[in-house]
Amino acid sequence: MMDRIRLERLKEKVTTAEEAVKLIEDGMVVGSSGFTKAGDSKVILPALAERAKKEPLKITLMTGASLGHGTDGKLAEAGALKKRMPFQVDPVLRKKINSGEVLFIDQHLSESAELLHNKNLPDVDVAVIEVAFIDRDGSIVPTTSVGNSVTFAALAKKVILEINTSVHEDVYGIHDIYQAENYPHRNVIPIVAPWNKIGRKTIPLDPNKVAAIVFTNEHDSPADIAPPDEKTTNIAQHILRFFEEEVRLGHLTDRLLPIQAGIGKVANAVLMGFKHSNFYDLTMFSEVLQDSTFDLMDAGILSFASASSVTVSKECYDRVFNNLQRYRDKFVLRPQNISNTPGLIRRLGIIAINTAIEFDIYGNVNSTHIGGTKIMNGIGGSGDFARNAYLSIFVTQAASKENNISHILPMVSHTDHTEHDVDILVTDIGLADLRGLAPRERAQKIIDNCVHPDYKEELQSYFDRACERGGHTPHLLEEAFSWHIRFNETGSMKK
């Protein structure tokens, strides 16, 4: 194991997790690796949770995105979290956030590193970073994600490294580590295609900041891969037919443009739909690479993928990382303030496909809050892509919970993406192309194409009566949230 520390003087920093975690004190700001359950802390943060049970302390925790192995929940349950950012998916932590016990900053994933570099957030006291090995110059090789680790390594006062021996050292070379200059001296980020590599293979790190090194041998939490169901299959088919029509009209080619897809079964269903299409030589410029990414590579349909992490099932993990020579020229992992940077999304012409909790008749999208108040996960990178994409597509089921909840409403209970950032809306019922439409046209298109039959008549009535009252974006304010109120009172949005 010590061979993984190639800078001799750092070998004396090897210790146990229980000793290393003593470096973290009450009130500190901690930055940890980890992006959508990949490349996250396997021992230090869990050890901190155990310590907090015996010795009360609270930290502010920043990561790339969500953590695996229930770590967020363990920290929340132990009372170790004062504030959390910028993303989470843990049910225990979610409950603590919604009760007000933990403060949560829901943030565009491209912005956390920017705010740290610009001194708009508190300094990072301790960084906890998972690595495959430490190189001779003290620089570090990340594992299955990059996330915000480059920024944490650069700005933290002290660094704790977790060397994960379950990740083979041949991951060296799959990362493209680039840090843009601080303002006002920032240069153009010279990426003009997803496969362009512009940085170095390791994360720079001042060896003098390394306060502790611990060894681990634990895989990432496997992704939960749900097979496509009737609704997700319908959504995928609507999107693929739309792409085929765009090709027929000459707007796109059979290679499309680089694709970004959010995580989950809808994204996987859409991507797997390409296996049975005429599209080929596809590329991705996204945040997370899922099973479907590598399935499309194996099928010869996807040529290259760029992201910030690999979050896959155990079967796919073994297939990829036990045969890395087969895949290493087909994907790259970057810092999230590169994978999600708005300028690159606009320059590359990304086709962005993300999931909504609900949307309204004008195309405003809620991606984060249930009933307008309770956070689900967070905005993640969907806003980075939606505002800047060549095509901004949002998907959701038309209705759920035995059709007692309509996901298309008169007005969303919380707005993450305004109508100005949304081009295409898709449900299992159909697809609405909103490009070039005024608000009243958008509303009728959405009602005609996307609404579940149980709710279409009432939504049409709402819109017709609102139009009689007038306005550029007609609404009946006294009824706009009546569907949400009805659900809270009766358990159903139906009249």
Image (tube, rainbow, N blue to C red):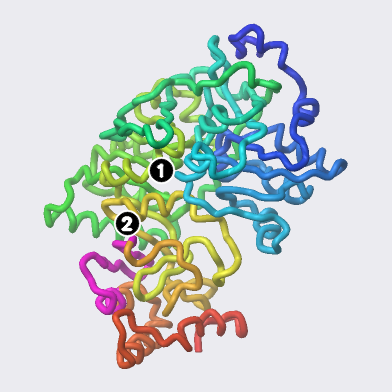
What label does residue 240 carry, if any? Answer: none
Q: Is residue 143 above or below residue 483?
A: above
Residue at the (45%, 44%) spot, across then down: 110
Q: Quadrant of the N terminus?
A: top right
Q: Is residue 110 above or below residue 397?
A: above
Question: Helix, strand, or loop for circle 2?
Answer: strand
Residue type, label 1: Asn
Q: Which of 161 and 4 lies nearest the eye of the viewer?
A: 161
Q: Which of 492 and 117 lies nearest the eye of the viewer?
A: 117
Is 443 part of what is drawn in magenta?
yes
- Residue 275 visible in the shown view: no
Instruction: Please state if 417 lies on the left or on the right of 248 as rendered.
Output: right
Instruction: Please state if 299 lies on the left or on the right of 407 as rendered.
Output: left
Residue at the (15%, 53%) spot, across then down: 251
Question: Helix, strand, or loop for circle 1?
Answer: loop
**Range of residues picked out in magenta:** 421-445
Mark 1 or 2: in front is 1
Instruction: Please state if 414 lies on the left or on the right of 10 as rendered.
Output: left
- Residue 332 visible in the shown view: yes
Residue at the (51%, 43%) spot, across then down: 115
User: Percent position (x, y) of residue 97?
Assistant: 67, 58
Mark 1 surroundings within 10 Å by alpha-carbon count, few (fewer than 14), some (14 through 19), many (20 or more): many
Q: Which residue is mark 2?
A: 392
Q: Residues under labels 1 and 2: Cα distance?
A: 14 Å
User: Percent position (x, y) of residue 452?
Assistant: 40, 77
Residue 299 sits in which quadrant? top left
Residue 285 sits in which quadrant? top left
Is 354 part of what is drawn in magenta?
no
User: Percent position (x, y) of residue 284?
Assistant: 33, 40
Q: Is residue 202 above or below residue 95?
A: above
Q: Which residue is mark 1?
A: 340
Q: Is residue 315 above or below residue 459?
A: above
